[in-house]
Image (cartoon, rainbow, N blue to C red):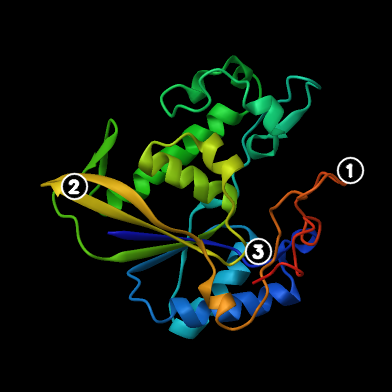
């Protein structure tokens, strides 16, 4: 089985939609996805993901099922320095790397910081959502692996967000989400591919074969958007809004 995790195109967060550039990205993305044999489409309930998916769905004449848990990961816990609740993927590295057990999928959830806020609750919602989705295709979680009596060579596509897509990978592959949230980035409209490996009959694991692929943009000469990336060098502006990283367009390949 193959799972495509597709990040929305360049976001217009104010209107929960996509920018004019995002519309170009979504169109190029649709040309790519329309060539794939997709069994089922799923989409986040948030506007920027739905507006991105709309280009592909219109081109293919298909519909997508809305999954409420597929919205951007919204679990929060208190910043240990300020006490202010912050999104789990928005904590500075100097702070989160000091959490005990944070690098290990088996222990990250036990951190006492998560006793306050809704991080554990939202994480459980996400994990349950992933398991319920996979159950539709015959997969059952069993410790560090998955069991499936009838694994098939088919593809599903999820139009969503960076934070939640990394949480999905975390649940599928038993990787701490903190590693994925803070050490990797998938640019807007990118495609991440996760495939099954069944080396023993009925025992399945997942492998990431593409992460944040944007060849549909590069082949068309469309620049990448840096939305989601913090500044390369210190600016005093601690934001992931598009245009603030300092990387593009000068170094855009």
Relative to the observer, which residue lies in front, 92 or 25? Answer: 92
Vertical side of 169 occupied by 118: above or below:
above
The percent coordinates of residue 221 (x first, y second) are 63, 82
- SS assignment at label 1: loop
Instruction: From the image, state whether disc 3 or disc 1 is nearer to you.
Output: 1
- Helix, strand or loop status at disc 2: loop
Residue 57, image x, y percentages: 49, 77
Res. 135 in view: yes
Residues marked 2 and 1 touching at CB (< 8 Å): no
Residue beneath label 1, please?
236
Q: Residue at x 20, y 61 (%)?
A: 152
What's the mark number on residue 148? 2
Mark 2 or mark 1: whose residue is earlier in sequence: 2
SS category of the residue bearing label 3: helix
- Above or below residue 19? Residue 87 is above
Q: Name the N-terminal-most of marks 2 and 3.
A: 3
- Which quadrant is the C terminus positioned in? bottom right
**207 versus 90 height, above or below:** below
At horizontal 64% and vertical 35% (from top left) the residue drawn is 88
The residue pinned by badge 3 equals: 48
Q: Residues within 10 Å of mark 3 (few under 14, many from 20)?
A: many
């Amino acid at each position: 089985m193959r799972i495509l995790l597709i990040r929305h195109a360049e976001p217009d967060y104010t209107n929960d939609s996509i920018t004019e550039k995002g519309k170009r990205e979504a169109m190029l993305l649709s040309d790519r996805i329309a060539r794939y044999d997709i069994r089922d489409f799923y989409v986040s309930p948030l506007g920027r993901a739905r507006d991105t998916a709309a280009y592909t769905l219109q081109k293919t004449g298909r519909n997508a099922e809305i999954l409420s848990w597929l919205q951007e990961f919204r679990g929060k816990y208190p910043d240990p320095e300020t006490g202010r609740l912050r999104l789990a993927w928005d904590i500075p590295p100097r702070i989160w790397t000091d959490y005990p057990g944070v690098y290990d999928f088996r222990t990250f959830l036990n951190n006492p910081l998560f006793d306050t806020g809704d991080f554990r609750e939202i994480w459980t919602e996400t994990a349950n959502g992933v398991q319920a989705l996979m159950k539709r295709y015959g997969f059952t979680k069993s410790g560090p692996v998955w069991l499936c009596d009838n694994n098939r060579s088919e593809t599903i596509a999820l139009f969503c967000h960076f934070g939640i897509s990394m949480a999905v990978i975390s649940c599928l592959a038993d990787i701490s989400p903190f590693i994925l949230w803070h050490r990797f980035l998938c640019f807007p409209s990118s495609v991440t591919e996760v495939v099954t490996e069944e080396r023993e009959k009925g025992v399945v694991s997942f492998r990431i074969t593409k992460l944040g692929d944007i060849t549909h943009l590069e082949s068309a000469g469309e620049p990448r958007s840096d939305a989601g990336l913090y500044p390369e060098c210190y600016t005093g502006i601690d934001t992931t809004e598009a245009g603030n990283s300092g990387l593009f367009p000068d170094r855009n390949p």
